[in-house]
Every structure is written in structure tokens, then in C-alpha cells.
Amino acid sequence: MPRLLSAWRRAARSPRRDRDGPKDALSPHERRELAAGVRRLSAGLTRERELAGARYLDEPRLLGAYLLFYWPISYAQAREALGELPRRPRTALDLGSGPGPMAFAALDAGASEATCADRSKPALAMARTLAMESGESLATREWEPSRPLPEGRFDLVVMGHLLNELFASAKDKTERRAALLRQAVSRLNPGGTLLVLEPALRETSRGLLEVRDALVAAGLAIRAPCLYRGGCPALSRPSDWCHAERPWRRPKVVEELARAAGLHKEALKMSYLAVAPEGEGWSEQPAGRLFRIVSEPLEGKGRRRYIGCGAEGRVGLALQEKHRSAGNAAFFSLRRGEVISLTDTEQKGDGLSLDDRTRVELVARAGRPILVG
Ligand SMILES: C[S@@+](CC[C@H](N)C(=O)[O-])C[C@H]1O[C@@H](n2cnc3c(N)ncnc32)[C@H](O)[C@@H]1O
């Protein structure tokens, strides 16, 4: 946060006004100005969506608000998603990078070089300033989807909150988005990953799932979060979508800006997809009946319930309190995103009922890879 703040102050030529306060906190004037930008970005990118696809990061005030509010959120989301990959990337390409939160997350996760690509010159300049301040190896390229991708091959290509801004009004938006993702996949080194993050809104998340299905139909394998290898079962009911939610301690400046802008961003929420290179199959999985928890705990009368998604699709999983045993106790404290294995269940309605014979084992925590053996 201190680096983001000082890069913004330098770009905005905003020396801190109150002499006495700490350097890593906002002055009241700065807070007011940034909060106005955050409100505008929030309304324009989530509610009305008139900013989606517009050149909002070319506007210095909105770039500043992005840097001090959304950048840390995107960065934390990327760190969570990168934690699920089987290998550390060494080289990374960040498409639609803005000021580079995804690229910096890749660098902090072990990459030694990263390239940021975007059409916004001011956002790329900000990414370069941040890299200079932190001594990171970062290149920038002006890019948009009608132009060829930056040269080279990469262990990681990442797209953070870009996809929903592309081709939004085209009838064939899913096909065009999928074609861009396939181009990106073609630049991966063996064992590499294309990581796509999107906002956890119903519309943007379902848009990502539709693209996922197009990629799966074309033979690509998904590394995370999917265990189901067919068409996404969340798409069969218009009210369903799929997102991750992780606890997060917000940096103080983000906290202050959220309060000043009247937003509640307590947990990290995002939809994401990690795609393997062409020709690489789905990852090997540990033996057993695996499910990823894709809902909050759903309380019912005397029972705990979740939605799980596994090789058999998206199903309700329920266990009555009276059937609690040493072997199934883990079920009562599961979190969204965790992967479990189950034995001894019974089909009930459209879900599975667990009982005191059921063994529930935690296979992977949210944000960690599924390990085999
Ligand atoms: C919501 S910001 C995301 C920034 C960053 N990747 C993140 O995750 O926080 C969307 C980015 O996509 C870029 N973008 C939108 N449409 C674009 C296009 N047609 N060509 C290139 N970049 C585009 C914007 O300039 C902006 O940097």
C-alpha cells in the first residue's frame, strides 16, 4: 500500500497536506477525492456498467481510485487463484493489465519477469512506475484484442477483469472471447496456465462459464476450480453461477475508501478459471469421490448443507447434526472453495445425504492445489 500511495501521489502531484499524519494514510482531502472516484468506478463497472469497455483508466482521477482501491483487491484475488496452480510461473503475460495488479501478484508468487499489456497508456505508465519503485522486472506493451499478442511464450497468461469488458454487445461474444482465450493458451509453455479472473456478479460469472464450456468443448482442460469435465452444471439454471469467496484483511486505505464511498467489500469474491495448454489433459486427481464446495454453509433444521461440484456434477450435500461422528465432523466447518472426499452417501432427491458412516476428508483448502499422493 505505501508504494501504491506514493506512486499515486507522485502521478497526481498531490503532496500530503496534513503534516502530522502518517505517510501511509490518506489525508481527508485525498480520501474525499479518491472516494468520489471509487463510487464512480463501482457504479460504472458493477451496477450500470456504462464504464465497462470504456477508457476509464485514461482519466487520472479514476486511475488513482483504481490504484488505491481495486488494485489491492485484484492483487489479493490473483494471489489466491495463483495458490491453486500446480507450478510456480517464471514468466507471465498480463492481458488487460491496467496498472498491473495481476502481474505483480505473479512476480510476488515467484515469476522473475512479467509483461503488462493494455490499451491504456496512463495505466501502463503507472505499472512501470510501480515496477521501478519495487525493483521488479516488468515490460509494458500497448495492446488490444484486434492486435497480435505480445511476442513470446509464457508460463502464465493472466486476464484480470478484462473478459467481461470485451465484445459485450456482440451476438457471438462467447465465441469471440473463447477465440481470444485460445490465442492466449497457444502462447503457454508446457505445464503453463491461462488464468482468467472475473467479477463475481451473476452476469459476468455466467459469461465466464459460457466461455469455459466453449473451451472444454474444443478439448481444453480446466485446472481449477472445476472437477466436472462436462458442460458447467451451474448454467442449467439461470439463477445459478459460480464464484469463490475468501476471507481477507483489507488494507487500511482500502477499508477507509470503502467506508467513505459507502461500499461493503469485506470478503474477496471472484469468479476464476485456470486453463491448461492445448494437448494437456485434465489433472490427475486423488482417489475417491471428490467435491468442491461451491456455496456458503446452508443451515437447515438440525442439519448442515452445502452445494458441492464434482465428477458427478453440482449436487446438494446434507448431513444431520444427529449423525455427527468422528469421521464426518469436518463437514460442519467447511468453507467455500475447499475440496473434500466423501464415502458412504445416499441419493436423496437431487442431492446426497451423508450419515454417521460417511467419512469426510479435506483434500485441499481453498487457494491451495489438489495434491495427488
Ligand atoms: C477492470 S480493469 C482490470 C485491470 C486489472 N487487470 C485488474 O485485474 O485489476 C480492465 C482493464 O481492461 C482494459 N481493457 C478494456 N478493454 C480493452 C481493450 N479493448 N483492449 C485492451 N485493454 C482493454 C482496460 O484498459 C483496463 O485496464
Image (cartoon, rainbow, N blue to C red):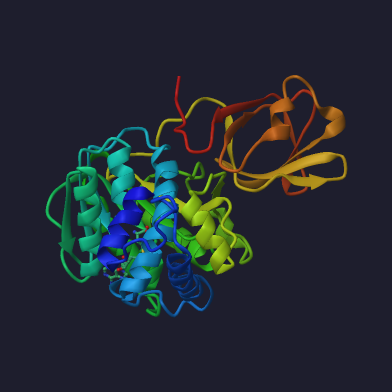
Q: Nearer the viewer, residue 24 or 117?
A: 24
Rendered image quadrant of residue 224: top left
Q: Considering only vertical position in the picture, is 140 above or below 54?
A: above
Q: In which quarter of the image is the C terminus?
A: top left
Q: Quadrant of ligand 1?
A: bottom left
| Residue 62, x across and y down, in percent | 37, 71
> Nearest the camera: 9 or 311?
9
Q: Is residue 302 left or right of residue 185?
A: right
In the depicted structure, whether residue 98 falls above or below residue 45: above
User: At x 38% / y 54%, what residue is drawn?
Assistant: 196
Q: Position of residue 158 (x, y in %)?
A: 31, 52
Residue occupying the far left of the picture:
151
Give the x, y percent position of residue 128.
Answer: 20, 55
Question: In the figure, is residue 55 to the left or right of 19?
Answer: left
Outermost residue toward the front in this view: 20
Does the rendering let one see residue 96? no
Is 103 located above or below residue 38 in the figure?
above
Which residue is painted at 32% across and 69% down in the image? 176
Residue 185 at what x, y percent from top left?
26, 51
- Residue 287 visible in the current orientation: yes
Q: Which residue is pictured at 55% across the width and 28% down the height?
A: 363
Q: In this view, does 372 lie to the left or right of 126?
A: right
User: Does residue 13 lie above or below 269 as drawn?
Assistant: below
Q: Residue at x 60, y 32 (%)?
A: 340
